[in-house]
Image: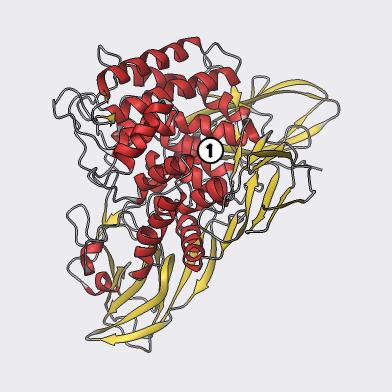
Amino acid sequence: MHKQSFWIWHYGDYEIFHTMELNLRREVREKPYPPFWRLSTPNVSVKFTKDFNCENNTKITVHANGEGYVSINAEKFSFNEEITLQKGSYTITVNVFKKVGLPSIFVESDIIPSNGSWYSKLSDSNKPMPVGFDTYYDSIEKNPETFSFEYSEIAPISAEIISDGVLYDFGKETFACLNIDYADSNQKMSVYYGESREEALDFEHTYILENISKSSYYRLKSRAFRYIFIKGATTSLKVTADYEYLPLKYRGNFCCDNQLFNQIWETSAYTFHLNCREGFMDGIKRDRWIWQGDAYQSSKINNYLFFDDAIEKRTAIGILGNEPFCEHINTIIDYTLFWIIGLYDYYFTHGDITFIKNIFPKAEKLMEFIESRLNDEGFIVGRSGDWTFIDWSDIDKTGAISAEQMLLIAVYNSFAKIKQALNLDPAKELEKAKTLTEKVNYFFWDSQKGGFIDSYESGKRNVTRHANIFAIMYGIATPKQIESIKNNVLKNDNITKITTPYFEGYELDVLGKLGEYCYIENMLENYWGGMLKLGATTFWEEFDPTKNGIEHYAMYGGKYEKSLCHAWGANPIYLFGRYYLGVYPTSPGFETFKVEPNLGGLKKFEGTVPTKNGEVKIYLDSTHLKVTATQSGGTLIFNDKKYALEKNKELIIEVI
């Protein structure tokens, strides 16, 4: 009887293939819109190999996604051929190529089923490495070129006749395949998608549309929308949709006495789930791309909601792609730096040393690329074709930018810790971090302004929040500098405010570290709550409360180009889990962790934070604290006292 087999591929090719597929689905008014950065593709030709012994006669059948042949002890066989082997020792090599697609194999055998014990290489001169596989692809029929989603039928909550068509409202933002059933197969209709009612009815500027005809039943491709206007339709038309989603388990939760905050948590969770697909997508309507800055924040949110390591690895492998690295990730300097920082954060949270070992050779090459972009002072600077992003804000980006140097310091420290985890010498990176910190303080710290300036080369001495936030986030600022930054930058209304949930997430992360719960709660109420008051059912890419009406939907010069369902808008998930429930790891893989709950300005809350091998449940009000951890290694810190958490035993403390 054959043992369980799985489709296997060269490590990383699956993630690269599906990232490529995802990034090529963007469309604007029926036209495809590819990314402007270099896309990696899977390897065309792969050799799969394994040494084995047969104690008895056995049969093997190799199936392939591609063309090629099987070689066993130099004798060649065809795919799908039942191969009979006598007792003895063998080396099997499966050579498979596919010009467009994902070269992969599925081996039926009771001796050598295809699984993680196989190796692959790209040429005879390459060192074999463990293959990639996913336990979902456990049968010949499940082609790994097809990414698996689940579907649930949804229906519009209203259908409104307007002029020469019907406007359908599905009640909230969704991502689904629209189903249209109508009698007249010769009828021509135009379908206009809208995240807002205004967009669906603005035929000239609707971002997504499709013209259809000559079919009595039509199932459109998966797209984002809340509203659908079908020009040429009548109310007799049957319209439904198949909601398309990744079946992730909700492991984290939060509920408190503030109903607005509860709504913010629920909306954040829904927003984030919609953007969890082959990888962490930025937004479900406009880009539908994987951006590393977005992905870095998404991983933090994921750790307090799903704690799904698979999507993090798919995202990291897919967006990095294949060598050579000749441009920044997404062409953005800070996004390349975030990849290295995020790699260590992933290891520290999930304790997955196998992944670190597999990806480390590429990480080393990325570090070499980063250092090729340094100037004589050792600062990372923009070269031709580079995008210095940081945030949508008025930042002085002349020459070397302090925010980028903060990230580079964090990169050196993160890479040093990765090397330590692999038992490699981190001395070089630690020394570079130390030297760069000294230079950053010399060139960018302004004692009169009480913070780090953006650029020293322009002479403007401009101070924004961004570099100062990074300085605190990554432990670069001294205690004295932190106090100065808090008072002169973060609490200074004359310093330009942040308008994106992206960087607001970083700012509130820092203010959480500083115990500024009042500021966090005001921002939650006015910023995220402000979107809800305007009818948002998911959180947006950017929000400026001074705007009015459809001004809120405009961005990048387009009337409706702002994403109204953007992953980084879900940052409150992280904030509630990290600073109110207060759970975080203190050693890789949650071998040890701390629980530091804080009511802030709330009267009570309860919630759950997932960990590597369990979860932590917390309840806190003005009289009692209750904590239960389902894995060992936890320490509760409350009212300046420490308590060891016993596995599966509720700890109850009276609040004084």
Q: Compared with residue 89, is residue 300 higher up or lower down, i.e. above or below?
A: below
- What residue is at 33 percent from the left and 74 percent from the top? 228
Q: Is residue 186 visible?
A: yes
What residue occupies the far front of the structure in this picture? 656
Residue 396 position, x and y percent, is 19, 33
Q: Secondary structure at mark 1?
A: helix
Residue 504 position, x and y percent, is 36, 47
Residue 132 position, x and y percent, is 58, 34
What residue occupies the far right of the structure in this picture? 56
Say which of 601 and 477 sits in front.
601
The residue wearing badge 1 is: 313
Task: Give the crowd class for mark 1: few <14, some 14-19, many >=20 residues within 10 Å.
Answer: some
- What residue is at 54 percent from the left and 35 percent from the top? 346
Name the quadrant of the N terminus: top right
Amino acid at pointer 1: Lys
Query: Is 59 positioned to the left or the right of 223 in the image?
Result: right
Q: Compared with residue 140, is residue 531 higher up or lower down, i.e. above or below?
A: below
Q: Compared with residue 624, is residue 357 higher up or lower down, i.e. above or below?
A: above
